């Protein structure tokens, strides 16, 4: 009974999703037909045809893999450094006082300012990594810092009373408490990292990159290419977001962590 | 004997312990009694080292391993009841935990998470965690803050049976308003009416 209800609900959600997607495609097609100029607005079939041509070229995959590597390296680095910073700043208040203004400045500064400045310092190949790292870092830090502060004080006292070793404290108290905050940071961070990384590639124009392909599409007025690469960026960002969510689900299951269930 | 001399504790303007002195036997079961607000829980927390006193002295407790069963269950919600107990004493085999669960009438509940247990079952798991923490310690101190809350007479009796099975050198210090649960046990009482 419960299974069939769940299946029905999933079917309904999927059906609704497909319906919404079809509706938007119809609106897009109608708008493209109304504009009537491919240079201004490409129709869905034209974009799909061009995408099919692109994916059969090795240079497409070179750009995809290079950009993925650069951008995700920045995101992963930001996740690692942001987590360490949050832990250290929660432990040592002087580090919080020292780093907080810097992180707030980074958060408030437009990504373009950093990219243009960084162009002077580093090679264009490292620019996307730098930009995504810098944009994701304050967000990871803020999320995890808040998470550490929200760890149940009564449970902290309990682990102290029962003399949990630091490893057990981390494994059984901090990790389960912080995973939701880390998941939120990953989900938002990947999207922001892709936006910042691609912007950095458009400005830095490194060889074999999605950003350079986007720039070329703009220069040569190849609107179908512009649409294709934009779609590829959206798909890649979503793919990595889903991948991160799946990985976190696996980790959660491995740690035997479950949401608190209702009392019978 | 454990000597408590001139113990003082205040939370802001609220003086909870005012030059409180007492002598407690170093083993057996001691029940701290008194009306609410007299500082019974505060006394337990100070004796266990969870909270510092503002003044006074405690002698005779240093070096003894202390298990504290809190008034709230404070179980880790994301792991099972058995794991919660086992974490207090990771060196003990699973069979030890299973034995404890069975003794408290929870043999079938070990795999359940705290959220899947009733209030009384959670209370017993928290109690068993304290017992497990003192496993293999002949002269441990077990501090129980309202251990019988939410328990029916049969469940309270099971906990009393476990208390009876502790090594004779163990000191059990408990705060409870359900004194009837202790009927038939050899209990000394420490009244706190005069602490203020």
Image (cartoon, grey):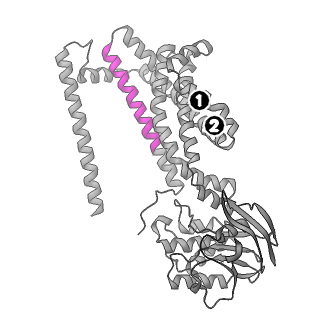
Quick one: which residue is furthest to the bottom in this view? B184
Label 1 crowd (10 A; few <14 / some 14-19 / many >=20): some
User: Looking at the image, which is closer to me, A209 or B36?
Assistant: B36
Task: Give the image location of residue A74, x and y in percent.
Answer: 55, 29
Q: At numbered mark 2, what does the secondary structure look like: helix, strand or loop?
A: helix
* Residue depicted at 53% across the width and 62% down the height: B79
Task: Give the image location of residue B133, x and y in percent.
Answer: 68, 70
Task: Give the image location of residue A262, x and y in percent.
Answer: 41, 63
Q: Are marks 2 and 1 in contact (CB under 8 Å)?
A: yes
Q: Which residues are magenta?
A: A221-245
Q: Main SS type for the magenta part?
A: helix
Residue A240 in magenta stretch: yes
Q: Which residue is mark 1?
A: A103
* Residue depicted at 52% across the width and 25% down the height: A108
Q: At numbered mark 1, what does the secondary structure look like: helix, strand or loop?
A: helix
Write down the chain letter for disc 2.
A
Quadrant hosting residue B159? bottom right
Q: Is residue B133 left or right of residue B75?
A: right
* Residue depicted at 48% across the width and 24% down the height: A196
Task: Give the image location of residue A249, x and y in percent.
Answer: 47, 49
Q: CA distance from mark 2 to mark 1?
A: 10 Å
């Amino acid at each position: 009974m419960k299974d069939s209800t769940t299946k029905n609900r999933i079917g309904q959600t999927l059906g609704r999703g497909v319906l919404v997607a079809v509706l938007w495609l119809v609106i897009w097609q109608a708008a493209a037909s109304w504009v009537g100029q491919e240079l201004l607005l490409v129709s869905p079939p034209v974009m799909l045809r061009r995408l099919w041509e692109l994916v059969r070229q090795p240079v497409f995959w070179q750009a995809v893999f290079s950009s993925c590597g650069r951008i995700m390296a920045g995101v992963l680095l930001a996740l690692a450094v942001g987590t360490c910073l949050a832990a250290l700043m929660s432990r040592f208040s002087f580090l919080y006082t020292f780093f907080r203004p810097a992180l707030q400045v980074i958060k408030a500064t437009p990504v373009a300012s950093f990219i243009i400045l960084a162009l002077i310092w580093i090679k264009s190949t490292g620019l996307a990594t730098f930009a995504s790292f810098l944009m994701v870092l304050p967000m990871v830090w803020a999320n995890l810092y808040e998470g550490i502060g929200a760890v149940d004080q009564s449970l902290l006292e309990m682990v102290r009373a029962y003399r949990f070793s630091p490893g057990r404290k981390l494994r059984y108290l901090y990790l389960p408490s912080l995973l939701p905050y880390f998941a939120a940071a990953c989900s938002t961070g990947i999207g922001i990292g892709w936006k910042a990384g691609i912007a950095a590639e458009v400005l830095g124009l490194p060889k074999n990159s999605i950003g350079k392909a986007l720039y070329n599409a703009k220069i040569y007025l190849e609107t179908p290419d512009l649409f294709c690469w934009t779609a590829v960026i959206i798909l890649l960002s979503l793919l990595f977001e889903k991948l991160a969510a799946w990985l976190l689900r696996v980790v959660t299951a491995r740690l035997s962590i479950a949401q608190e269930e209702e009392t019978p | 004997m454990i000597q408590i001399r001139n113990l003082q504790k205040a939370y802001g303007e609220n003086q909870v312990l005012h030059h409180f002195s007492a002598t407690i036997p170093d083993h057996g079961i001691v029940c701290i009694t008194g009306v609410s607000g007299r500082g019974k829980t505060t006394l337990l927390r100070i004796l266990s080292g969870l909270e510092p006193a503002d003044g006074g002295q405690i002698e005779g407790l240093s070096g003894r391993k202390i298990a504290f069963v809190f008034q709230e269950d404070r179980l880790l919600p994301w792991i099972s009841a058995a794991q919660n107990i086992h974490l207090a004493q990771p060196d003990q085999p699973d069979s030890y935990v299973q034995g404890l669960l069975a003794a408290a009438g929870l043999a079938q509940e070990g795999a359940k998470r705290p959220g899947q247990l009733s209030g009384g079952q959670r209370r017993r798991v928290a109690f068993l965690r304290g017992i497990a923490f003192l496993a293999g310690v002949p002269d441990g101190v077990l501090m129980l803050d309202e251990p019988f809350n939410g328990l029916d007479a049969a469940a309270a009796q099971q906990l009393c049976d476990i208390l009876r099975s502790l090594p004779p050198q163990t000191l059990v210090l408990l705060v409870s308003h359900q004194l009837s649960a202790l009927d038939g046990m050899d209990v000394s009482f420490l009244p706190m009416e005069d602490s203020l």
